[in-house]
Amino acid sequence: MNRRSLLQGLGLTLGSLTLPTVGRANTTPTPEKPFRIAHITDVHMMPLIGAAKGFARCLDHIQSLAHKPDLIINSGDAIMDAHRGGRAVAERQWKLWNEVVEKELSIPIVQSLGNHDIWVKNESPASILDGKKFALDKINEADFYFSKDLGDWHLISLDSISPNNEGRWYTGRIDEAQMHWLKKELEAIPAFKPVMVISHIPILSACIFFDGNRFENNQWNVPGRWMHEDANELKNLFAKHPNVKLALSGHIHLVDKVEYNGVTYCCNGAVSGAWWAGNYQQTKPGYAIIDLYADGRFSNHYTPYA
């Protein structure tokens, strides 16, 4: 069954993931039956070390839950180092990713881009746009950033991989055009509708301080490619819209939850753990289950699968 047929069979549409009016009482989140999401991130598919089998185990674990998720969200880094191995290597990894998804997955999925997904001829800011277009085609998504209804909630997916002309080829932030779009989008969403934000790179995180040696010369050092450079601007924007409740991310392969100004920021580990070499520090390979309730409540639970 293709993705469009699967979505339609569940009463969802590719454009908005809006639940239908007919039969709505059976599908709308309630205190008893929330809209359930499985958040996967940082799979880092590669044709070595059992990555495909590990990803298949993860999907099987998700789909074997007593309360099966209504949707899977992949927040990026589906493949490994597209920017270093050459286009043929990236093509092979994407082929493997899509083979596992088509064979093993029976739940609708929406996907965002991570830095590892972007194929570039060289690590330069000028190459990023074409690399993103290449990756979008592989995940069957139309836009770098997008907005969708999820029943009584609203999802905003940000593209947090931006060109960086000072040092590394990318950094974590949204560009001016995307910021303008985000402001308009938040203004248009009814104030009573809870909002969940997805980004590959964390907007706000605690675990970034433990990813490598981040303390040197009597100060903490957090690179912009670890956490959003525009975190302060986004924090101020969210404060104007109290219906922004939850922000999910990956990228760091560690798990944390930070509550600040009424928004809960969750960094949800990695399906690949330590890049398919076991645990990353104290974090096991896993995914998160997010339950969204009609009254604006939610839960986020990280779940090891092996």
Image: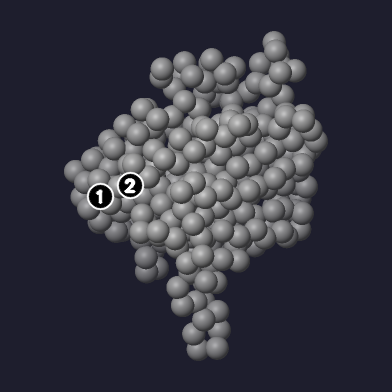
User: How many circles with numbers are drawn on the protein?
Assistant: 2
Residue 51, which numbered label?
A: 2
Q: Secondary structure at mark 1?
A: loop
| Residue position for label 1 | 48
Residue lying at 52% horizontally and 50% vertically, measured from the top left: 304
Q: Position of residue 113 (x, y in %)?
A: 43, 45
Residue type beneath disc 1: Leu
Residue type beneath disc 2: Ala
Q: Are marks 1 and 2 in contact (CB under 8 Å)?
A: yes
Q: In the visual, does 148 lie left or right of 114?
A: right
Specify few, some or many for label 2: CA neighbours under 10 Å numbering under 14, 14-19, or 20 or more.
many
Q: Position of residue 279 (x, y in %)?
A: 44, 60
Q: Quadrant of the N terminus?
A: top left
Q: Position of residue 27 (x, y in %)?
A: 68, 21
Q: Position of residue 168 (x, y in %)?
A: 37, 65
Specify few, some or many for label 1: CA neighbours under 10 Å numbering under 14, 14-19, or 20 or more.
few
Q: Secondary structure at mark 2?
A: helix
**Residue 200 shows in this picture:** no
Residue lying at 54% horizontally and 43% vertically, measured from the top left: 39
Which is more toward the observer, 36 or 235?
Answer: 36
**Residue 215 shows in this picture:** yes
